[in-house]
Structures are given as structure tokens and as C-alpha cells.
Image (cartoon, rainbow, N blue to C red):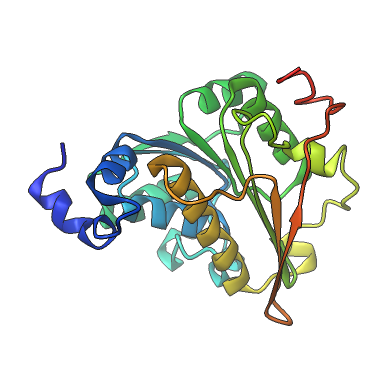
Amino acid sequence: MLTDQELLRYSRQILLAQIDIDGQLRLKEGRALIIGLGGLGSPVALYLAAAGVGELHLADFDTVDLTNLQRQVLHDTTSVGISKVDSAIARLQAINPEVRLVAHRSALDEDSLAAAVAAVDVVLDCSDNFSTREAVNAACVAAGKPLVSGAAIRLEGQLSVFDPRRPQSPCYHCLYGHGSEAELTCSEAGVVGPLVGLVGSLQALEALKLLAGFGEPLVGRLLLIDALGSRFRELRVKRDPACSVCGGLHA
């Protein structure tokens, strides 16, 4: 049940007919894994904690750098040099002490990633490199867990949801294959802060929809964001029956 304090804290979203008390209870019982606590992971963690998602698993092996602070709003100047996970825990506990926080301070290998994915209800990929995204996707497909994937670089962003529980849903590999990106990071190509805030906020919204069971998740659709022209485009993405990652799921 929700306590009186929780009813007050979450009252503005409980007022929404699409969420109501039942949806808030589902959020309270929900568990989310956030992989990467940088530009995308910052708004994801902040909004999921504020919304009352019961358990957040925080994965990042990096420390806070001064150059992060232009966009990684989860951290502040006093956090420079310390673990991003520890910085995040301090901030999130201050926002909502009711949320349980599980720390993953080391890089996740194949086994630890599989265990981390299996322990939650939804995974949010907020990483900044293709190899991590591929590994996270494979783990989500194997465990049958929905994946909310976001990316942002320079002045362009992307967002999609891959849900292996749905027969028609593609996976990340269906869309990108083995990848052709040049592995550029924000430190090499640059990025504007509000763009990662926008993509991360949309990732958090998609996770709330999946956990609380409302709305239409961005499954089978790729949202493209052009920050320079303030334009949004949506592309339909089909599942690849021959995909080497998810091709045998619903055969």
C-alpha cells in the first residue's frame, strides 16, 4: 500500500487517470537498471527516483570530471573526482529517501550484466558506446526484459524501446546490425547539454509507461531529434527474422 506521505509526494501524477493509485503501486514495486550515469543517465535517474520507482540499480564505473558538469546534472562541483555511482546515490537519496538504490561501481562483464538485467523489470541504456549497447541488448533479449535505448551526440538524438516480450518488436541489433559508427564520444564530437536532458527525460517517460502500464511505448519506432532545427521525426522499425540476436525468439 501507499503511505500517506507517498500519496502526498506523488499526488500530481496519481491525479492522472492513466496512472492513478494502481499505477503508482506498480511504480513502487518496479525495478529499473540504469546503465551509465552521465548526460542521459542523469535525467533518467532523477525522474525515476522522483516518480517513486521502488528500486533503482545504478551502473557506472567512471568518476565525475569537471567536463561532465556542462550536461550531467546529476552531479555537481563537489562530486568531481568521486565515483559517479556514489555521487548519484547522494543526490537521489536527497530527492527521495523512499527509493532503494543498488550500486554497480565496476564495469559489468557478460555474467554480471546478465545477473543485473535479470534482477530488474526494465533496463535503460544510457551508455555512450556501441559495444556496450550491443552487450546490453543481447542481455535484455536473453532475459526477456524491455530496453529503453537513447543516444545523443553533437546536436542529434535518438530514442527507441525494444521489448522482446512482444513478437513484433525489433531489438537493437535489428536496427543497427554490427554497427558502422566511428565510436565517437561527446568528448571527441561535442554535445549540447539540453539535448541529452531531452533524450534522457524521454527515456524516463518510456520507462514509467512500461512499469506503470499506461500509454503507448516507443516499440517498433525510432524517434530522431534534430536539435539544430528543433525538429522531430519518427521512423518505423521492423523486426528482422534473421537477426542473430533475437531471430529465434518467436519462431
Residue that protrudes farthest toward the left in the picture: 4
Q: Is residue 202 or residue 38 the one in the foreground?
A: 202
Q: Is residue 73 visible in this depiction of the protein? A: yes
Q: Is residue 244 or residue 117 the one in the foreground?
A: 244
Left or right of 93 on screen, residue 74: right
Residue at screen point 42% across, 48% down: 214
Left or right of 189 on screen, residue 81: left
| Whole-percent x, y for residue 40 in the image | 57, 57
Q: Quadrant of residue 100?
A: top left
Q: Is residue 155 or residue 183 the one in the foreground?
A: 155
Considering the image in quadrants, where does the C terminus appear?
top right
Residue at screen point 11% across, 44% down: 3
| Whole-percent x, y for residue 247 in the image | 79, 24
| Whole-percent x, y for residue 121 in the image | 46, 32
Q: Is residue 83 visible in this depiction of the protein? A: no
Residue that protrudes farthest toward the bottom in the picture: 229
Left or right of 63 on screen, residue 190: right
Left or right of 129 on screen, residue 118: left
| Whole-percent x, y for residue 11 in the image | 20, 59
Residue at screen point 48% across, 53% down: 204
Q: In the displayed structure, would residue 31 be above or below residue 190?
A: above
